């Protein structure tokens, strides 16, 4: 598949697993087919929602192989290359490139928290230079990495032509606005990863959204993106309220948000709902809360 300009709804796909935390291939393929059939604009596998950093290395590679085979160029496919050092990330980028991926998603490294702009610049510059056939998507998610990619670093990478895409999941609207004001004029495409801020981001010029609840209701988010393209504030506000309800009942109603969205998908027949260890599975009561909400939905995907 050739590199195309990313835009629209890119779904961070969940990873169904068995009792031994191995990828449940038949169910994972069904999840991918459902999203492709719904008309989303791209798929992101092995990210935060996909628990990529938690999988065994062999299972991470198997996840990427299955996705590449199943999607088979039907739409842009992004692979999460998220790890604790530049060399580890570059190894993953190499695997993705060999599998035919054209986009990889890279966060700041973690465990040893990045402290200076030069560390961020070194990481993303080396990752971007490691393989000319794959485009790096910078993923700003300080809640997981404990560091925020400095806006000046993203601007410098954009000036060099090393970076064209950024997903922001910081919840920091001032940071997002800085990206739009300072980096977007340099050619950077900014994607909003925080669901409460989707309407504002699309009205503010974001190139797209990366919403976890789109696993369950892809059409809600496709409609929101289309309303953003039209700059239809009334429709966006209506859909933002629906998104708020989804988030409140799937992600915030239980201790582990990943278990929440996976249980919602399990209610539709996609896997068991089990998160990768050591994440906490839901209790019987918590599962029932999610299942009741999913079954009572008035809007079907």
Image (tube, rainbow, N blue to C red):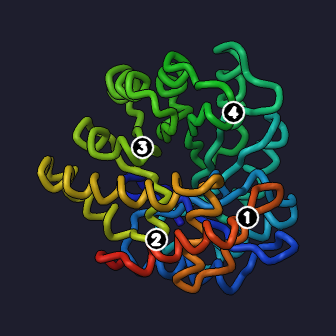
Residue identified by numbered label 1: 281
Measure the alpha-carbon separation of dots 1 and 3: 30 Å
269 and 103: which one is in front? 269
Measure the alpha-carbon separation of dots 1 and 2: 19 Å
The answer to whether marks 1 and 2 mark residues whose Cβ atoms lie closer than 8 Å is no
Q: For residue 41, what is the image quadrant?
A: bottom left
Of callouts 2 and 3, the N-terminal one: 3
Q: Is residue 205 left or right of residue 288?
A: left
The answer to whether marks 2 and 3 mark residues whose Cβ atoms lie closer than 8 Å is no
Q: For residue 272, what is the image quadrant?
A: bottom right
Q: Position of residue 109 (x, y in %)?
A: 74, 33
200 and 196: which one is in front? 196
Residue identified by numbered label 2: 216
Of callouts 1 and 3, the N-terminal one: 3
**Residue drawn 76% across and 56% down?**
279
- Quarter that holds the C terminus: bottom left
Residue identified by numbered label 4: 145
2 vs 3, front mark? 2
The answer to whether marks 1 and 3 mark residues whose Cβ atoms lie closer than 8 Å is no
Of callouts 1 and 2, the N-terminal one: 2
The answer to whether marks 4 and 1 mark residues whose Cβ atoms lie closer than 8 Å is no
Residue identified by numbered label 3: 191
């Amino acid at each position: 598949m050739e590199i195309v300009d990313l835009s629209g709804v890119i779904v961070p796909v969940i990873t169904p697993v068995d009792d031994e935390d191995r990828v449940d291939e038949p169910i994972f393929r069904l999840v991918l087919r459902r999203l492709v059939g719904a008309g989303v604009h791209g798929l992101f596998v092995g990210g935060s929602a996909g628990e990529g950093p938690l999988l065994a290395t062999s299972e991470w590679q198997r996840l990427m192989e299955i996705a590449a085979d199943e999607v088979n160029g039907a739409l842009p496919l992004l692979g999460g290359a998220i790890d604790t050092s530049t060399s580890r990330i570059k190894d993953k980028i190499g695997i993705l490139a060999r599998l035919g991926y054209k986009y990889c998603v890279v966060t700041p490294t973690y465990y040893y928290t990045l402290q200076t702009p030069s560390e961020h610049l070194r990481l993303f510059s080396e990752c971007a230079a490691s393989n000319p056939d794959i485009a790096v998507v910078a993923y700003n998610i300080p809640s997981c990495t404990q560091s925020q990619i400095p806006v000046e670093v993203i601007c410098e990478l954009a000036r060099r032509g090393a970076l064209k895409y950024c997903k922001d999941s910081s919840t920091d609207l001032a940071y997002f606005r800085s990206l739009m004001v300072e980096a977007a004029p340099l050619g950077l495409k900014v994607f909003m990863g925080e669901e409460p801020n989707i309407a504002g981001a699309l009205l503010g010029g974001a190139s797209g959204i990366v919403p976890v609840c789109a696993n369950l209701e892809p059409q809600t988010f496709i409609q929101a993106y289309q309303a953003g393209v039209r700059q239809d504030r009334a429709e966006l506000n209506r859909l933002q309220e629906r998104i708020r309800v989804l988030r409140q009942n799937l992600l915030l109603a239980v201790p582990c948000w990943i278990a929440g969205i996976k249980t919602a998908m399990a209610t539709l027949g996609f896997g068991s709902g089990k998160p990768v260890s050591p994440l906490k599975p839901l209790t019987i009561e918590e599962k029932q809360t999610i299942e009741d909400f999913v079954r009572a939905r008035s809007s079907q995907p």
